[in-house]
Image (cartoon, rainbow, N blue to C red):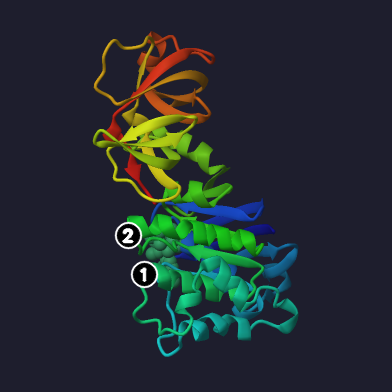
Amino acid sequence: MELRVRGAKTFGAFHLAADFTVEGNRIGIFGESGSGKSTLVNMLAGLERPDSGEILLDGEPLFAADRRINVPPERRRVALVFQHPHLFPHLSVRGNLLYGWKRCAMANRQVGLDDIVDVLKIGRLLDRGVTNLSGGEKQRVALGRALLSNPRLLLMDEPLSALDDTLRFQIIPYLRGACEALAIPYLFISHSLVEMRLMAERVIVFSQGCQVADTTPDALARNRMGDSPVGYINLLRLTDPCDNDGLISYAWGGTRLFLTAPPGEGELLFELSSKDMILCKKHPEAISARNLFHCTVIGIFEAGRKAGVELQCGTGRLVAEVAAEAARELELTVGSEVFAAVKASAFRRLG
Ligand SMILES: Nc1ncnc2c1ncn2[C@@H]1O[C@H](COP(=O)(O)OP(=O)(O)OP(=O)(O)O)[C@@H](O)[C@H]1O
């Protein structure tokens, strides 16, 4: 998918100026509240008319002020998933799903009901009404309905914000997996950096209506590490839990991690803040932290007055954060060997 956006929109004192071209299938739009993300989405969907500029999807104009083109929303083949699912209460799950499909021209019907039911695992819900579904089920049905309209582009505007943390991270594999399996490109809009890293390969950053960066989610997270109260969030996928003297040990990076978190099934996602890691030049004689990794420094980056230290720990990688002065004292350079200590309670389960 190639999306070219050059568009401006003014609402009173707020001015949005977008000018970017993106290629790829997993694009993120990131920005704080009020930065103009939804305005941009509405312009792409045809719900808001830009004051000027043009919007081209795979070279085809959806909007072009100078050529007086403004394709109506229903003819853009751009689908939307919002924060709230907005399902039709009088229709069953099947009826909601087929709503988009029935409105899709025959020639464009590549994705059918069976494909959606399969990737979103909603077969057992098909004949149920929608009012008693859980929040996560409702959002999966809303996603299915959008995908069944066989869009050329799916816009997801903060689709996880109304869900609690556990559900948020359970839904992400469905959002991403379904679009990948059905080859439907998407634009994922969020103000959560962790969501961005799990959903997008490239991210356009907005601040106060202006586009301020075009980067990767990981580079954005590193860049913001120094100013962020939570530092850089390491995302770890852990497997094979074993009870270990009151702690749970998990396989990760060719070694085992010791956590206080309760065990779960399958592959589990955990976060570990760069702030919760302590680096030592030598092996400490005795230490209360239950995890001690012998690591090699593979990168060092500046983030304000902090230094981000990228570590190779077995086959896994982690980013630790130290004060610039500490980095000098430890004489950290690429290739240095260090020990990283992490408390068992520092890991937080995401999904
Ligand atoms: N139809 C409108 N009329 C007047 N002002 C609007 C309209 N739509 C958006 N705005 C204003 O434009 C600015 C950007 O809003 P927008 O919803 O695009 O931001 P956002 O980044 O999506 O925020 P959030 O993450 O909180 O949803 C806000 O100041 C908002 O009040």
Residue 277, relative to residue 240: is it above or below?
Answer: above
In the drawing, what numbered circle is on residue 164?
A: 2
Q: Position of residue 128 (x, y in %)?
A: 42, 84
The kind of residue tagged 2 is Asp
Q: Total of numbered circles in the picture?
A: 2
- Mark 2: which secondary structure? loop
Task: Please say whether residue 222 is visible from this viewpoint.
Answer: yes
Residue 30 at what x, y percent from top left? 48, 51
Residue drawn 28% across the image and 24% down it: 289
* Residue hosting label 1: 135
Whole-percent x and y of residue 63? 66, 70
Residue 130 or 208: which is nearer the viewer? 130
The answer to whether residue 301 shows anywhere in this view is no
Q: Is residue 7 left or right of residue 302?
A: right
Q: Quadrant of residue 102?
A: bottom right
Classify 10 Å Cα crowding around label 2: few (below 14), some (14-19), many (20 and above): few
For this view, does 148 lie left or right of residue 136?
A: right
